[in-house]
Image (spheres, rainbow, N blue to C red):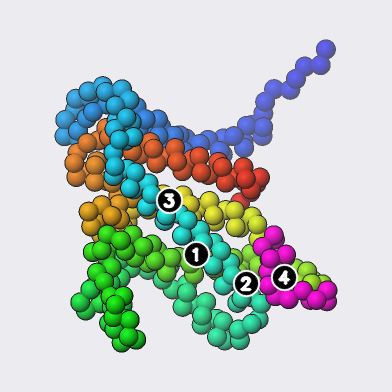
Amino acid sequence: MRLSKPLSIQHLAPYLFLLPALAIMLIFMYLPILENFFYSLFRWSSIDPRLFYVGLSNYKRILSDPIIALSLRNNVLYAVISVFFQVFIALVLAAILESGAIRPRWGTTFRNILFLPSVLAVTVVGLTWQLIYRPDTGLLNQLLEVIGLTSLKTAWLGNEKTAIFAIIAVSQWQWVGYVMILFIVAIQAIPEEFYEAARIDGANRIQQFFRITVPLVRETTLVWTTITVIGAFKVFDIVWVMTAGGPNHASEVLGNYLYRVGFRNDEMGYAAAIASLLFIITFLLTFLQLRIGRSGEEI
């Protein structure tokens, strides 16, 4: 009978190298998620060591909380607009720059101008755009007045109808150039022979874009669509800096409301339930996108 060879250090070496990373993920990622679900079943305070078991009451409260519904709507709106600009428009801009339709010198300048906002701190961006959006001395309203569109002037961050759209616009301005650069890298990896063959067959630039560029950057598109959607549901900093969820919760998002409930109202159990909701939403969206794309490969 053939005996199996005992495991040697060579066989165990890969697992030993993975062990530190797995331990870090377990301690700092998976255990906190489980702890958060556990604490969401209690009513507790950050200054009181006592835990009061309430079962699923915090989750029932989520279902009846109108601010949760408003925040979720704003997150969905944020995600849809972000996917359109940070994925589709970024891909179009990348394709235009790589097609040679713009002179290389001007293309480089245009690329740098679009990429520059992504290296700025979110706080700097938020405070700067607060000044631009000011209803009295803000650059935007003054520009509208100069070009004869005085009727469009408004308090962009103080108007319940425009606050969330003003914030979303700032986010697109900051990140569309960053994603555009990543798409440029993906397009540069496409063999030029494909485009030459398409031009010989009489395909114009729009046909080349949809029949060559879009299919061959599919992996990049899938990855950044997933990242963009997750980021839209996790967004907090730009909203908190610019409006803190106001006016009258008009620009509230889940991350912003979670912070307010937990650290302003000191309702830690309810905040943990909101965090669990946020985790479930992002997990399901990621799983769904990867299933639809039928690929989980990294770029």
Q: Amino acid at mark 2?
A: Ala
Eyeballing the image, is 159 above or below 107? above
Answer with mark 2 or mark 4, whichever residue precedes in sequence: 2
Amino acid on which the number 4 mark rests in the picture: Gln
Is residue 209 located in the magenta-colored stretch of the structure? yes
Span of residues in magenta = 199-216
Q: CA distance from mark 3 to mark 1?
A: 14 Å
Say what secondary structure mark 2 lies in: helix
At x 40%, y 30%, the residue is: 34
Question: Residue 95, which numbered label?
Answer: 2
Q: Which mark is residue 208?
A: 4
Frontmost residue, 249 versus 102: 249
Element marked by disc 1:
helix
Label 1, label 4: how far apart the Cα atoms are:
21 Å
Instruction: From the image, tell me which residue sits under label 3.
Output: 76
Which amino acid is tagged 1? Phe
